[in-house]
Image: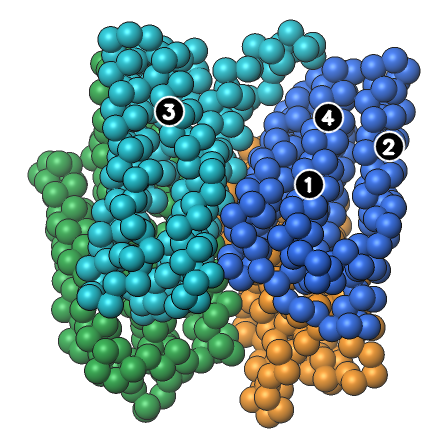
Chain colours: A cyan, B green, C orange, D blue
Amino acid sequence: MPTSRLEAFSDGVLAIIITIMVLELRPPDGPTFGDLADTATGFLTYLLSFIYIGIYWSNHHHLFQLVRRVDGAVLWANLHLLFWLSLYPFTTAWMDETGLAPTPVVVYGCNLLGAAIAYYVLQLTILRAEGSEGVLREALGRDLKGKLSPVLYVLGIASALWVDEWLAIVFYAAVAAMWLVPDRRMESFVAAHGSTA
Amino acid sequence: MPTSRLEAFSDGVLAIIITIMVLELRPPDGPTFGDLADTATGFLTYLLSFIYIGIYWSNHHHLFQLVRRVDGAVLWANLHLLFWLSLYPFTTAWMDETGLAPTPVVVYGCNLLGAAIAYYVLQLTILRAEGSEGVLREALGRDLKGKLSPVLYVLGIASALWVDEWLAIVFYAAVAAMWLVPDRRMESFVAAHGSTA
Amino acid sequence: MPTSRLEAFSDGVLAIIITIMVLELRPPDGPTFGDLADTATGFLTYLLSFIYIGIYWSNHHHLFQLVRRVDGAVLWANLHLLFWLSLYPFTTAWMDETGLAPTPVVVYGCNLLGAAIAYYVLQLTILRAEGSEGVLREALGRDLKGKLSPVLYVLGIASALWVDEWLAIVFYAAVAAMWLVPDRRMESFVAAHGSTA
Amino acid sequence: MPTSRLEAFSDGVLAIIITIMVLELRPPDGPTFGDLADTATGFLTYLLSFIYIGIYWSNHHHLFQLVRRVDGAVLWANLHLLFWLSLYPFTTAWMDETGLAPTPVVVYGCNLLGAAIAYYVLQLTILRAEGSEGVLREALGRDLKGKLSPVLYVLGIASALWVDEWLAIVFYAAVAAMWLVPDRRMESFVAAHGSTA
C-alpha cells in the first residue's frame, strides 16, 4: 500500500489532538489579569504538549519521506503510536487540574515514555517491512536523540516520585528542546539521495 | 467519481471519532493513583472503542485499495457506515458512566452490530457499482471474518441480557482480537495482481 | 488556483461538524432503556442534522467534480456556506434541549434556509468565475431541487410559527428525503462528457 | 520536502479551530427569541473569529501557491502560527463570557497580534528557505496589509486599555474587513507567471 492515506489519517488525528487540548483550557473565572494569571499552569502544560505533538508530527513527516510502501503491521504500529498520543489531552488535563501534583506528573511522564517507545516500535516495523533495501536505516544513523529521550523521561518520572515535580518538568522540557533543533538527518539524506516517497 | 475524496472525508470523520472519545475520559477527581484507578473502566472502554475504529479504518483502507470508481449510492452507503461509527463515543460514554450496566452493554453491542451490517452493505453496494468485473469480489473471497463478527456480537448482546455483562465484553473483545490479525486477503491480492486504485 | 485544497478544507470542516454533534448527545442519566428513550428527541435531531451535512457533502463533492479553477471569491463563498453549516450543532442542540419548542424549530429552519441560500450563492460565484465556458451551467440544468428547498424551508418555518412544530419537522425532513435520492445530473453529465476536474 | 503534507496538516488544524469555537456557543437557556438574543455577544465574537480564521486559511492557501519546497524551519514557523491561532477559541470564549470586559478584549487583541507576527515570521522563514530565486518576494510586493494590521491591533489594544472596549472591537473588525477584500497580489502574479507549486 502507498503511504498517502496513512499520512492523511495521522495528520487528521494529530491535528485534532493538538487542537482539542485547547478545549481543556477553560476561560478564566473572572475578567481581570489576575484571573488570567491563575490559568498559567494550564497554559504552560498546554504549550508543552503542543510542542510535543508538533515534534511527533514533524518527525513523522520526516520519517515517511523515506518510506515507500506500508503493510498491515505498519498500519497498526502507527495506530499504536496515535493511541499513546491521543492520551496527551487526558494526562495534560489531569496534571493541570491538580496543579502539577506528583502522581499526575509521573503519569504524564509514563505517557511521554509510552509514545517514545511506540515511535521506536514504528521505526522498527517500517525497517522490517522495507527489508534489506535499507534506505531508512542508513538515514536514521545511530538515532541518538531517539535513544536519549526515554532515558530523560525515566529520570523525569523518578524525579517526580522521589525529588520534586518541577525537576521532572525540567527533564520533560529538555527532551522537547532537544527535538526542537530540527532533525537534519532526514533532510540532509533527502538532499543527498532524493526522496523515495 | 474517483475515490480520493470519499477516502479523505472518511479519514477525517474516523480521525475525529477516534480522538474525541478521549474527551469523554474525564481527568480523575483527585491527584493520587487511587483516583486514577477509579477511571479504569473508562480507560478500558476507550481502548476497546479505539481498537474498533482502528480496525474499521484499516479495513476501509484495504477495501478501497481495490475500488476504482464510486457512485452516489456508494457515497451514501459509506455515510451510513460513518453514522453508526459516529455513535461509538455516545454508547461508549454511557457504558462507562454506568459502570458497565447490562442495558448500556446491550446498546453498545447493537451499535457494534449496526456498524458491522453497514460495512457489509457498503461492500455489497461497491460490488454492485463495480459490476461483473469483480476484482473486489474475488479478493473478498468467502469473507469469513465478516460473517462471523455479527454472530459474535449477537452472542454478546444475548449474554449481557441473560447471563453477565462481562461475558458480553469478552465476546466483543474477541471480535476485535480476530480482526487485529491483519487482513491478508487484500494485501496478498494486491501483491499478486497490483492495486487498481 | 486548483480546487484540491478548497475541497480538503471543506471535507475537514464538514467531517468535524458531522462528528461533534454527537458530543451534544449526552449519555442518558440512568442505566435503563427508559433513560435511553428519554434521549430520543436528541437522537432524532442528530440523525436529521447528520443527513443534512451528508447531503451537503455529497452535493459539494458532485459540484466540484465539474469545477476546474477557483478564485478568491469562490473561497469566500465556500467559507460562507461552511459558516452556516457550522451553526448546525448550535441550533440542533437548542432544538433538542428545549424538547422541540416552537422558537428553536423556527431558528433551526432559518439556519437550514441560510445554508441553502449560501449554497446557491456558491453555485452562482463558481458560474461567474467559470465564465462563458459553462460546463457546470449545462450540468446544473433547471436545478429544480435547489429552487424547491427554500420554499419548503419557508413553509416549515411558517408552520412552526403559526401551526405546529412537528409539521415544520415534516417539511424539513421532506427536503432531506428529496435530496437523499442521489443527484443524477452531475453523474450522468460526467458519464456523458467526462470530468473536467 | 514538498508542501503537500504541511498544507494538509494546517488545513486540518484550521478546520478544527474554526469548528470547535461553535462548541463554546452554549445553546440559549430558554426557548424564546429573548433567550436567543442573550447569546448575541457570543454570536458576534464567534462570527469575528470565524472570519479571522477564514482569512488566515485563505492567505495561507494563496501563500503556499508560490512555495515549492519547505525545510524544518518552515515546519516550525508554521506550527508557531498554528499555536497562536489555536488560542482563538480560548480568548474568544473569555471575551464572550465576561461580556466584552476590557482585559479580555486586550488579551484577544494580543492574540490577534501574536498571530499576525507569527504569519510575518512564517513569510520571512519561507523567503530565506527559497533563497535568491525570490518568486514569492516579488509577489508579496510591499505587503501593505501585512504591515498595517499590527498597527491597527495595537491601536485596538490601546483603545481597550484606555478608551473603550467597543472601539477596540471596531479596530479589530477593520483589520478583518481590510483582508476580506481578496488578496489579488498572489492571484494576479499566478495569472501572469503561473503557479510554481
Quadrant of res B166: top left
Q: Who comes first in sequence, dot 4 or dot 1?
A: 4
- On the image, numbered disc 1 is attached to which residue? D121
Which is more toward the observer, C148 or C102? C148
Q: Is residue D57 above or below residue B74?
A: above
Q: Residues within 10 Å of mark 1 (few under 14, many from 20)?
A: some
**Residue D43 x %, y %:** 73, 34
- On the image, numbered disc 2 is attached to which residue? D152
Which is more toward the observer, C35 or B173? B173
Q: Measure the C-alpha gap from mark 2 to mark 3.
A: 39 Å
Task: Please tell me which residue is depicted at 74% across the width and 48% down the height of the picture.
Answer: D55
**Residue B125 x %, y %:** 37, 75
Q: Residues within 10 Å of mark 3 (few under 14, many from 20)?
A: many
Q: Measure the C-alpha gap from mark 2 to mark 4.
A: 11 Å
Secondary structure beneath label 1: helix
Q: Amino acid at mark 4?
A: Cys
**Residue C38 x %, y %:** 42, 35
Q: Measure the C-alpha gap from mark 2 to mark 1.
A: 18 Å
Q: Who comes first in sequence, dot 2 or dot 4?
A: 4
- On the image, numbered disc 4 is attached to which residue? D110
- On the image, numbered disc 3 is attached to which residue? A172
